[in-house]
Amino acid sequence: MFTDECHRDTMRMVKRIASAFLWFVATAWGLSFVNLIMEAPPALGIVIAAGVSAFVAVDPLHLFWPLRAVAPVVPTRAAAPAPGAMQTQV
């Protein structure tokens, strides 16, 4: 769909941001339910949810967003000698 590398990177970042937002909402909702049962401070759920969503967005261990494979550069033909260069024969 997108051929430009800039657009591909933009779409990857949109996916990361949307995923982090969904993780924040899901974690905050789940911890608010736990707070109702255990009577924990409500701000604790928001802080934990922010930490979880930041971890998903940054992903330092590449658990959610794997690194892109970079194809190795392989020369297709031997390099030609420079013009005027002396070649020695063994």
Image (spheres, grey):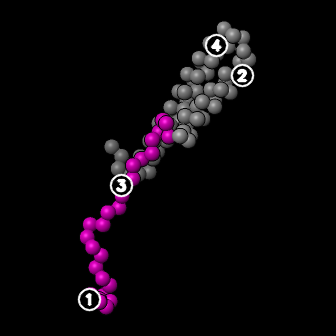
Task: Please name the residue that numbered disc 1 is placed on.
Answer: 89
Q: Quadrant of residue 53?
A: top right
Q: Name the residue located 63 percent from the left edge and 18 percent from the top edge.
A: 31
| Furthest residue in direction right, as rendered | 41
Amino acid type of the residue that numbered disc 2 sits on in the rendered structure: Ala
Examine the rendered structure and indicate whether residue 42 appears above or below residue 89.
Answer: above
Which residues are the magenta region? Answer: 62-90
| Furthest residue in direction front, as rendered | 90
Q: Nearer the viewer, mark 3 or mark 2?
A: 3
Task: Please name the residue that numbered disc 3 is placed on.
Answer: 71
Q: CA distance from mark 3 to mark 4?
A: 47 Å
Q: Which mark is residue 79?
A: none
**Magenta stretch: helix, strand or loop mostly:** loop
Q: Which mark is residue 34?
A: 4
Examine the rendered structure and indicate whether residue 67 appears above or below residue 36.
Answer: below
Image position, residue 15 (x, y; %): 47, 36
Q: Answer with left or right where residue 3 lies relative to residue 38.
A: left
Amino acid type of the residue that numbered disc 1 sits on in the rendered structure: Gln
Q: Residues within 10 Å of mark 4 (few under 14, many from 20)?
A: some
Q: Name the residue located 62 percent from the left edge and 26 percent from the top edge.
A: 49
Image position, residue 46 (x, y; %): 67, 24
Q: Name the residue located 60 percent from the left edge and 35 percent from the top edge.
A: 54
Q: Secondary structure at mark 1?
A: loop
Q: Nearer the viewer, mark 1 or mark 2?
A: 1
Q: Residues within 10 Å of mark 3 (few under 14, many from 20)?
A: few
Q: CA distance from mark 2 to mark 4?
A: 12 Å
Q: Residues within 10 Å of mark 1 (few under 14, many from 20)?
A: few
Q: CA distance from mark 1 to mark 2?
A: 79 Å
Q: Which mark is residue 43?
A: 2
